[in-house]
Each structure stands twice: as C-alpha cells, then as structure tokens.
Amino acid sequence: MDRGAVVRITDVAALAGVSPSTVSKALNDTGSLRESTRARVREAAERLGFVPDASARSLSARRSFTVGLLSTDSAGRFSLPVVLGAENALVGGELSALLATARHDPVREQHHVRALVARRVDGIIVTGRTTEPREPIKVPMPVVYAFAPSSDADDASVVPDDALGMRLLVEHLVGLGRRRIAYVGGRAEQAASLVRYETLAAELAARDLAAVGEPLYGDWSEQWGRRAVDQILAGGPGSGRADGALPVDAIVFASDQLARGGCDRLRERGLRVPDDVAVTGYDDWDVMSLASRPPLTTVDMQLERLGQRAAELLIAAIEGDPARGVERLAPRLVVRASTLGDG
C-alpha cells in the first residue's frame, strides 16, 4: 500500500480476515466478539496505521466522546487541580474535554451549560472554589460534582474528607505532646470552617482535652491570621500577666493562608514556631505552605485525585452505571517544620 494512501476500514478488514462491521465492533469495543478476534483486528489496524474517523465513531456509538468541565470560577486555586486530574482520567478513557469557566456568574454559567448541551457532550463535571453545596444544573446527560457538591442528595458528588483531615492533624499534634490547642477559621458560615472546628473539638474531647477559648472566625486571609494570633495571645507574654505563661502550645488554622499570616505574627511577637507554639495549616497550597517561615505542616486534599475520581464516576455513568450521593476522598497529612522544627 502506498504510504500516502488513506487507510480504510476495508483495508483493516482484509488484513485481519474479518468483515468491516467486525472491525468497527472490535475498535469501538462493542458487539459480542472473541477477545482473540479483537486483538487480531487491533494488530492489523496498528500495522496499517489506521486512524478511525471520529465523526463516524460518534454516529455509530451515538456519542460525541467529549465531556464538559464546568468551573464556577476562573479555574483558580482549588478548581484548577480538580480540572487537571479530571482531564488526565478523561484522556485515558479516550475522551476529549471542553473547559468552560463561569467566573462565579450565574448568567455566564447558564450560557456555558446551554453551549455544552448544544454540543451534545456525553456528560459534565461541575467544580467550584468552595465546598459549599450548590444548586444542580439541569441537563439531559450525566453530571458529577467535584469539590463543590450538589445540594441534591441523589446527585453524584466527590468532596474532600475534611473531618478525616482534621483528625489527622489532631492526632499529630497530641502525639507531639501539644495539649493547649486553639482554632482559627475562615468565614463562620462556610462548611469548611465549621466542619474543621467541630471535628477538632470532638477529637480533643475524645482525649479528655478541650480547645483553648472559642473558635475564631474571619476572612480567609493572612491579615486575619495575624489578628487572630493577637487575640489568642491576649494575656500571654508582654500583657502584664503575672505568670507570663502562653495560653496555647499549638494553633490550628483552617487554611495555609491563615497559617502563614499567623506564623509571621508569632515571629513578630518574639515567639518561636514550633518551639513555643506549633502551627498547622490546611490545603497544602505550596504558594503558602512552602513559603511560610517555617514551612507548614498541613493537609493535602489531593485535588487532582479528586478530579480523577469525578471523571471515573462520570465515565461509569455514561456507560450506564451511575453513582448516587456524596463520596468523600481521603486527604493526606503533610508534616513540615512548623510542628517538628528543623529536626
């Protein structure tokens, strides 16, 4: 065969000694064929350099072999790794991805949803920048929600297991002998702040301990982390307190950004991290966790793995095996100098 000639399905059929319809079934993993027949057809296709016609494949399978990735923000800190993980899994499943960013704009989101439906995507993965439940989208194809779960309990959602992440942090700190632990969260109305504190309190209570003071809530910012340290240390060194004792020996911050600000303020107040006060963050955002002085012990939510899992669930749903409810993905404790010091 001439090298410049287009290889047709009939050429593959002739080399493999089967009919063109058998070639189609073998290459599209459809029909009832022996595995030896499928292997023979694939070997023939590879030898000839046969490239299936994508449009013909779509028509025969009644699928577009594309999936929509809908992010409610601009593919930022949390949604970007989710999208990357999902795309890796989709490529492995021989699916293409169409990315649409709604930038937290409901009108823009509806525009993208209509566009994805018009393109007849096989399914949609929806992600966002918080773990707050969101209203589901209404589309005639499977949908999986990643990081930002659907408010409909029947929908398939994959979220980080924040409770497990906080249990890992408490176990680590208590194992190091820390007993006077305070908590600094982000916004009080957000699930991430509340779940992380509630788990902290429960884990300490199970060990006959209690968090120092009330939980402190504010913005998810370094500035709030700094101010929170001043509130926690009120009555400590430099305050005129008679015994000069520190009220805490560890502070658990609900994010790395908060913890970085907290570390800076502790240092400015003449305290050593972790010798005087151990500090933990949450998220393992390397821009913050590694740039902090010292680098932060934190929790990696494994967002790329979360995106990959969402894609796996979507592929299964497209193939007729949909999941229901919320699946929580286990995080990973990352131990660094803010709790263990240089050694």
Image (cartoon, helix red, strand yellow):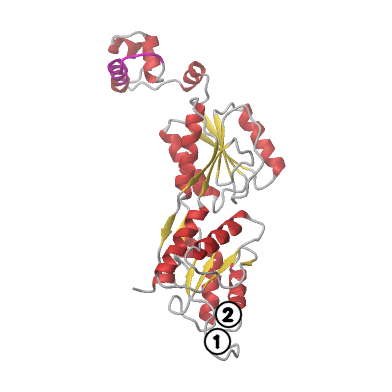
* Element type at mark 1: loop
Residue 34 inside the magenta-drawn segment: yes
- From the viewer's perspective, is residue 304 above or below residue 169? above
Q: Quadrant of residue 237?
A: bottom right
Q: Amino acid at mark 1?
A: Pro
Quick one: 96 or 10, which is closer to the camera?
Answer: 96
Q: Which residue is mark 1?
A: 237
Residue 138 inside the magenta-drawn segment: no
* Element type at mark 2: loop
Quick one: 213 or 317, which is closer to the camera?
Answer: 213
Query: Residue drawn at (59%, 76%), measured in percent from left and top?
Result: 232
Q: Which residue is mark 2?
A: 233
Q: Which residues are magenta?
A: 31-42
- From the viewer's perspective, is residue 88 above or below residue 121? below
- Pinpoint residue 185: horizontal percent, then vertical percent: 59, 64
Query: Residue drawn at (49%, 48%), measured in percent from left and top?
Result: 81
The answer to whether 27 appears left or right of 205 in the picture is left
- Pinpoint residue 19: horizontal percent, then vertical percent: 35, 8
